[in-house]
Each structure stands twice: as structure tokens, then as C-alpha cells.
Amino acid sequence: MKGDAIDPKGLIQESYRIDGISLEECRSILLDWALALPVDADTSSNIGLLLDRYASGRADHPMTQVLTEGLAEKTTARRRGGWRGRRQSS
């Protein structure tokens, strides 16, 4: 399944195959996965699909925990800096 739209590099699939993988390693893999997605991809939807695909019967796997945390977290728009962030309104 490597190279599909949900897991472009097969990173999540491989993480479930690694015996003794740590929570920190799973977080790093999830970051690499997220960076490989297209900019306009719906990350939350894709995480849900990954959970459906890989987490069944693996509730104790660290990647399941990381994916669940990623699905639960909502990101809000924040000031990104630059000249637009410092501009004064007239």
C-alpha cells in the first residue's frame, strides 16, 4: 500500500510493523507523514482513515495513541509574524 493518498510514503503502515517502537518515535513519524501530505489535504480526515485502516485491535500500540491525540487536537490560526502581523490598522 505504499504510495497511496492517505499514507504517501507508507510511514504509518511501517510504524505498526516495528516491534518496540516508542511514543516519541511515533510522534516523529506522524510529523514526517504530515509533511508529506499535500498542503490542501484534510489532515483530521486522513488521520481518521489511518485509524480505521491500522488501529483495529491495536489499541495499545503507541502509533494508535499518537493518531488519536492528533485527531483530538484542534489547531487554531495563530499570528505567523512578518510585516502583515506588525501592520497598524488605520
Image (cartoon, rainbow, N blue to C red):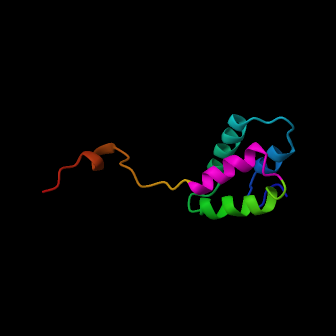
Which residue is painted at 68% across and 62% down in the image?
A: 48
State left or right for residue 16 relative to residue 88: right
Q: Quadrant of residue 57?
A: bottom right
- Would residue 52 be seen by someone viewing this image from the given angle? yes
- Work out whether residue 27 or residue 85 is closer to the camera in this orientation and state it: 27
State left or right for residue 10 relative to residue 32: right
**Residue 49, position as x, y percentages in the image:** 72, 63
**Residue 40, position as x, y percentages in the image:** 56, 62
- Work out whether residue 34 or residue 19 is closer to the camera in this orientation and state it: 19
**Residue 1, position as x, y percentages in the image:** 85, 58
**Exactly how many numbered labels are in the figure?**
0
Which residue is painted at 61% across and 56% down in the image?
A: 71
Q: Is residue 85 magenta-colored?
A: no
> Where is 20 relative to 17, above or below?
above
- Return the residue found at the far front: 60
State left or right for residue 57 relative to residue 45: right
Magenta stretch, main secondary structure, is helix
- Magenta span: 58-72
Which residue is painted at 64% across and 44% down in the image?
A: 31
> Where is 22 relative to 90, above or below?
above
Q: Quadrant of residue 81?
A: top left
- Would residue 5 be seen by someone viewing this image from the given angle? no
Q: Is residue 62 magenta-colored?
A: yes
- Return the residue found at the far left: 90
State left or right for residue 90 relative to residue 51: left
